[in-house]
């Protein structure tokens, strides 16, 4: 048995803020003692830091299998650990697609020894093509709890209804329900849009993607939730109308949850005026009023989680002209710093959005996002809220460098990360 003591910090979790050192055991992977003046075989200095449950990301592209030039499970998990994440839900837009037991097993095998828990999401439809349901029952037996036709969204309402009914009929061994996560974009409206349709798309002469493309699918799926009684998780909400509809659905008692990404909380479509493809995103950056509405939804509980929407691309792809570059930005290492620097949200309100609320949505609450108590799994992030650093994409752990926040100076970073009782990040450096 090897123990590690996290000393000198203050604990902040579901039970509030309090003083105390934390002793973890790498053999059991649990917290074995919380109290004053603890020491272990190894000690991690947390002076001036906050000790919290590790973060859980609901939405990351790890690209393996098939797109390893942009990212691998190893490099993505390293970036996640440096960002304070102890668990990441890997999206299924791989090649081949994560839509069958063989690919799920391959992803799980590749994730052994990763610096965070990697839980694959599977596609709702085979190949994310919206024609044939993926074998959700079989995949749930392998531990898959989230399904998403990531990047496309289920276009056919009847197909989505059947998917919800199928998911609602499946009983999982751990009792956690299956979650259908929807990328909301009506393809008939989105067409070839490359940025938000509005004042700036008109000025720049770029094809616009209207807010209604997102909002129509949000409205449709809320109606399907009402019809079937089966919940939906809305990915990457970006418009005021979407937030308002989710707020009303929750007020009506419907089982819906929602996430938002850091770039939709902080950047507007005006950033596209530079024609810099780092700002080519999907959903696109919206207006200042949309950003304000999304922030309000975060504060009033309409939005349940901040998800990174980590979307790595090889450099050549992001160096193409704006309208030819693929959408996306990396975000696993920067999300905490962006939230602390750009949002007027105290850590007491921010941590639920990064940790235990997404853990509950993903069906990971038994292992991640747990309070810092004796007997809890030792999946822990130690946050230095005063650490100042500048985002340089080429210096991050991801194989890709396409950060929409390149050059931004942020305040706040994870100093240490503990996974199953073992330090995987020490003093801002990931384990080798």
Image (spheres, rainbow, N blue to C red):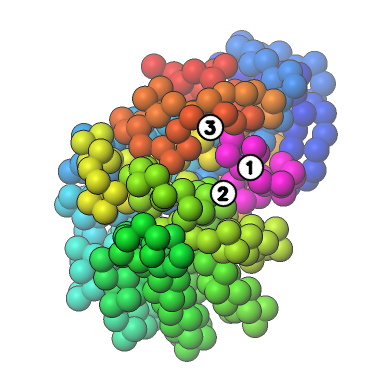
Indicate the secondary structure of the residue bearing disc 3. Answer: loop
Write down the residue under mark 2: 266
User: Does 12 appear above or below 6?
Assistant: below
- How far apart are the alpha carbons under marks 1 and 3? 10 Å
The residue depicted at 49 percent of the width and 23 percent of the height is: 424
**From which residue to which does the magenta span run?**
336-355
- How far apart are the alpha carbons under marks 1 and 2? 7 Å
User: Does 376 appear above or below 135?
Assistant: above
Q: Nearer the viewer, residue 321 or 219?
A: 321
Write down the residue under mark 3: 408
The residue depicted at 36 percent of the width and 57 percent of the height is: 204
Q: Horizontal placement of 417 versus 374: left or right?
A: left
Q: Horizontal placement of 192 versus 287: left or right?
A: left
Magenta-colored stretch includes residue 5: no
Circles 1 and 2 in contact, beta carbons < 8 Å: yes
Q: Earlier in the sequence, mark 3 or mark 2?
A: 2
């Amino acid at each position: 048995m090897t123990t590690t003591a996290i000393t000198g910090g203050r604990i902040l979790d579901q039970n509030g803020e309090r003083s105390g050192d934390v002793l973890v055991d790498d053999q059991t992977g649990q917290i074995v003692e919380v109290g004053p003046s603890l020491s272990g075989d190894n000690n991690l200095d947390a002076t001036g830091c906050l000790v919290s449950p590790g973060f859980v990301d609901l939405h990351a592209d790890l690209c393996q299998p098939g797109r390893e030039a942009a990212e691998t499970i190893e490099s993505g998990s390293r970036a996640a650990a440096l960002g304070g994440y102890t668990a990441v839900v890997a999206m299924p837009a791989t090649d081949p697609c994560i839509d069958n037991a063989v690919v799920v097993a391959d992803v799980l095998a590749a994730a052994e020894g990763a610096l965070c828990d990697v839980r694959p999401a599977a596609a709702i439809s085979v190949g994310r093509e919206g024609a044939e349901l993926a074998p959700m029952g079989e995949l749930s037996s392998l531990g898959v709890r989230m399904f998403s036709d990531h990047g496309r969204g289920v276009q056919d309402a009847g197909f989505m209804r059947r998917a919800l009914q199928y998911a609602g009929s499946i009983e999982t061994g751990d009792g956690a329900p299956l979650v259908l996560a929807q990328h909301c974009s009506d393809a008939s409206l989105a067409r070839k849009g490359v940025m938000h349709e509005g004042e700036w798309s008109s000025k720049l002469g770029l094809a616009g993607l209207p807010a209604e493309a997102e909002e129509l699918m949000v409205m449709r799926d809320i109606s399907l939730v009402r019809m079937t009684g089966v919940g939906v998780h809305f990915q990457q909400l970006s418009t005021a109308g979407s937030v308002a509809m989710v707020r009303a659905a929750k007020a009506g008692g419907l089982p819906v949850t929602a996430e938002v990404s850091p770039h939709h909380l902080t950047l507007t479509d005006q950033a596209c005026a530079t024609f810099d493809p780092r700002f080519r995103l999907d959903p696109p950056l919206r207006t200042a009023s949309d950003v304000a509405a999304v922030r309000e939804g975060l504060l009033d509980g309409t939005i349940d989680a901040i998800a990174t929407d980590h979307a790595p691309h090889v450099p050549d792809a992001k160096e193409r002209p704006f309208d030819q570059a693929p959408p996306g930005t990396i975000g696993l290492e920067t999300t905490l710093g962006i939230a602390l620097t750009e949002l007027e949200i105290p850590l007491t309100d921010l941590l639920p959005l990064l940790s235990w609320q997404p853990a509950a949505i993903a069906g990971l609450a038994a292992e991640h996002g747990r309070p810092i108590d004796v007997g809890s799994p030792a999946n822990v992030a130690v946050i230095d809220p005063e650490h100042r650093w500048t985002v340089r994409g080429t210096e991050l752990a991801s194989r890709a460098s396409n950060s929409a926040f390149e050059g931004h100076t942020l305040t706040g970073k994870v100093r240490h990360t503990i996974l199953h009782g073992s330090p995987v990040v020490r003093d801002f450096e990931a384990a080798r």
